[in-house]
Amino acid sequence: MKKLILCVITCLMVTLSGTAFAWSDRSEGRPEQTLGQLMNTASLSIWHDRNDVFHVKSTNLRGRHVFTGVIQTDGRFYNIQEKELENGDFVKVDRDHNTIRFRFTGRGLDEINFNIRKGKTVKFDLYRDDREMPGKDIFIGKKGWHPRDNNFRLKNN
């Protein structure tokens, strides 16, 4: 009887954690960029980790660039964390918690992290210096694949 109860509790916990490892394999793991890529390209890295957290990180080690974007989900964003933001940078979440707008300015590294509850997709619309961000400067997941353009979505499997 105890084994049955333990089995039911385990199944319930796995079911409730639902999305923990369910996002596209293409988005799993931090991109492995070379030092040359990091030094020479004002880029955005996007990845999902084992703790069910999405990361969006700008790398801007040369020159001054402004990254802006809108991130949307059919679920709700929660546990939104900002890292290394400076003056002029912002992260804004709408009232329904399904849209994030951000602006990263200047030089260096800026990052936002978030979870998604009950969502099947997350859509990105990304810009650098008020122009559509080239897909080649967006690195997604461990293999650092590039989307076709600045407007793309990731799906929960």
Image (cartoon, grey):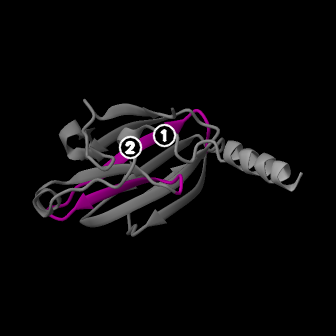
Q: Nearer the viewer, residue 98 or 22?
A: 22
Badge 2 vs badge 1, beta-carbon distance below 8 Å? yes
Give x and y (percent) for residue 38: 17, 60
Q: Pointer 2: what residue?
A: 27
- Kind of residue at badge 2: Ser
- Kind of residue at badge 1: Trp
The dot on residue 33 is: none
Give x and y (percent) for residue 128: 25, 46
> Is residue 29 something one can see in this rendering?
yes
> Is residue 89 something one can see in this rendering?
no
- Mark 1 is surrounded, within 10 Å at the Cα level, by few (under 14), some (14 to 19) or many (20 or more) other residues, namely many
Q: Residue at x 89, y 51 (%)?
A: 1
57 horizontally vs 4: left or right = left
Give x and y (percent) for residue 56: 39, 53
Q: Residue at x 81, y 53 (%)?
A: 3
Residue positioned most to the right: 1
Q: Residue at x 51, y 32 (%)?
A: 157
Q: Quadrant of residue 136?
A: top left
Q: Pointer 1: what residue?
A: 23
156 horizontally vs 65: left or right = right
Magenta span of residues: 51-76
